[in-house]
Image: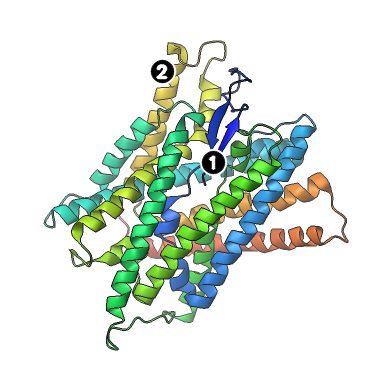
């Protein structure tokens, strides 16, 4: 997501004061590159009709949920209870225990899992570039994950969410560039694949009935990751009141970009490769070490992905950074004093190092996406917003919005359970081939 606003209410670390008259450009966080990178999985598991329907439904429901969440945040701000985090919303609306023991930990787990996923996919991208330039290279994936973790470690020292605004803008440009390159490449390969009847693309959904059913639910969890954000309250807190109209415009711009990138990559990729498509769409462009496109073009496209992933990972570190710095910093000292800088650098080093370690140990990215979607994004971005709205505004039981919210809430709580079970099943199946620091 990305949208620039002029704001005078940037959220500082709790305890530190900032000039309330200072106007700043504040970005919404970048769309996750791996959403685009893996979007063809949804079509592969459901076929044309089911895949497009689920992608459209995911976009529609999350846009609706984010709009409701924005209204709830503004309502409480007008009452003098400005909520800066998901856990603060849960604390005020559901009760202190919900914010402290349920919503807060889920959000932090989602953000941490997203950083792990970024490190893993970033390492895979760097290794892909290495093999394209050195086909006989024997370096293992874990070393490239560490290299990407080093890049993340440098960017992680950005002091605040506001300081990432230029990185976010660069991230948006990279995402659009990557999506355009991937779509063009898929069309080029697809035309060649469909040039003769023998090589015509097969779009049937393969696998046993049980595997196909579990695949559908795993794909739903991935859709939640695709359209999930997990940081809407933190984003809205950076906008100067009144925020409703600005936030709505931001969502419109965000979803225009999201739909253009995700649908173009997913549709073109599935059209070109059908049910033989790899989970990582860029893997389809290299067969037995030989690129189907000019080598420089593939390297350029992967480079776009690599740097965008770094930007995404740094943004999703911010909620955890804020919690750690509230625990470790001294609000009476200057934010850039030695007393506050040293704990900040050390805590972020430990955060990135641990995420890099897990990415090197657990290289099953599709499974990680399923767990993140089922455990985190489904409740945070699909179910909780409608619950918050119904409790805050108490719409009449005869109104359409009350029952619409109730249906959304019930449906996605069921999907949380089923999606989580499907993701765990995939991990159990992959465990047969699992080893620590695998030779990939």
Instruction: Find residue 81 and report its horizontal and vertical position in percent.
Output: 75, 31
User: Extreme bottom residue here?
Assistant: 197
Query: Against 274, is 305 above or below?
Result: above
Q: Are marks 2 and 1 in contact (CB under 8 Å)?
A: no
The Cα atoms of the two marked residues, 2 and 1, are separated by 28 Å
Query: Against 147, is 327 above or below?
Result: above
Helix, strand or loop under label 1: loop
- Horizontal side of 403 relative to 269 (left or right) equals right
Residue nearest the observer in this picture, 287 or 105 = 287
> Residue under circle 1?
28
Instruction: Find residue 348 and report its horizontal and vertical position in percent.
Output: 42, 29
The image quarter in which residue 297 lies: bottom left
Q: Is residue 313 visible?
A: no
Q: Residues within 10 Å of mark 2 (few under 14, many from 20)?
A: few
Which label lies toward us, 2 or 1? Answer: 1
- Horizontal side of 403 relative to 164 (left or right) equals right
Q: Residue at x 48, y 49 (%)?
A: 31
Which one is earlier in the sequence, the residue at label 2 or at label 1?
Answer: 1
User: Extreme left residue here?
Assistant: 136
Q: Is residue 57 visible?
A: yes
Total marks placed: 2
Q: Residue at x 82, y 47 (%)?
A: 393
Q: Residue at x 60, y 23 (%)?
A: 14
Helix, strand or loop under label 2: helix
> Residue under circle 2?
342
Residue nearest the observer in this picture, 140 or 133 = 133
Instruction: Find residue 197 and report its horizontal and vertical position in percent.
Output: 30, 89
Query: Against 71, is 349 above or below?
Result: above
Which quadrant is the C terminus positioned in? bottom left
- Horizontal side of 152 relative to 408 (left or right) equals left
Instruction: Find residue 108 and report its horizontal and vertical position in percent.
Output: 54, 40
């Amino acid at each position: 997501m990305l949208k620039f606003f002029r704001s005078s209410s940037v959220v500082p670390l709790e305890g530190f004061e900032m000039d309330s008259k200072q106007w700043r450009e504040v970005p919404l966080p970048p769309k996750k590159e791996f959403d685009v990178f893996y979007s063809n999985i949804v079509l592969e598991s459901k076929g044309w009709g089911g895949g497009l329907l689920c992608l459209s439904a995911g976009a529609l429901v999350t846009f609706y949920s984010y709009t409701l969440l924005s209204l709830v945040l503004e309502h409480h701000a007008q009452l003098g209870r400005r909520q800066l985090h998901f856990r603060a919303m849960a604390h005020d609306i559901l009760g202190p225990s919900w914010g402290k023991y349920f919503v807060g930990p889920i959000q932090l787990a989602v953000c941490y899992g997203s950083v792990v996923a970024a490190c893993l996919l970033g390492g895979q991208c760097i290794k892909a570039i290495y093999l394209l330039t050195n086909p006989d290279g024997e370096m293992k994936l874990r070393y490239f994950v560490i290299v990407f973790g080093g890049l993340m470690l440098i960017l992680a020292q950005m002091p605040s969410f506001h300081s990432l605004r230029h990185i976010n803008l660069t991230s948006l440009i990279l995402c659009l560039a990557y999506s355009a390159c991937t779509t063009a490449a898929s069309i080029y390969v697809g035309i060649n694949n469909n040039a003769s009847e023998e090589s015509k693309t097969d779009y049937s959904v393969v696998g046993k009935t049980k595997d196909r059913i579990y695949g559908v639910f795993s794909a739903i969890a991935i859709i939640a990751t695709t359209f999930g954000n997990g940081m809407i309250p933190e984003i809205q807190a950076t906008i100067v009141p009144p925020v409703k109209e600005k936030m709505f415009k931001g969502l419109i711009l965000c979803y225009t970009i999201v739909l253009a990138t995700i649908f173009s990559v997913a549709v073109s990729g599935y059209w070109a490769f059908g049910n033989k498509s790899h989970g990582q769409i860029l893997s389809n462009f290299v067969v037995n070490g030989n690129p189907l496109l000019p080598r420089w073009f593939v390297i350029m496209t992967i480079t776009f992905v690599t740097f965008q992933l770094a930007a995404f990972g740094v943004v999703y570190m911010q909620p955890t950074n804020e919690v750690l710095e509230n625990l470790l910093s001294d609000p009476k000292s200057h934010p850039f004093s030695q007393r506050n800088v040293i704990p900040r650098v050390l805590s972020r080093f430990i955060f990135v190092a641990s995420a890099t370690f897990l990415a090197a140990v657990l290289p099953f990215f599709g499974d990680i996406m399923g767990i993140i979607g089922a455990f985190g994004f489904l409740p945070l971005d699909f179910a909780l917003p409608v619950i918050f709205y119904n409790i805050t505004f108490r719409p009449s039981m005869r109104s359409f919005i009350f029952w619409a919210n109730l249906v959304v809430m019930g449906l996605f709580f069921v999907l949380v359970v089923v999606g989580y079970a499907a993701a765990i099943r995939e991990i159990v199946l992959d465990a047969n081939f699992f080893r620590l620091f695998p030779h990939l």
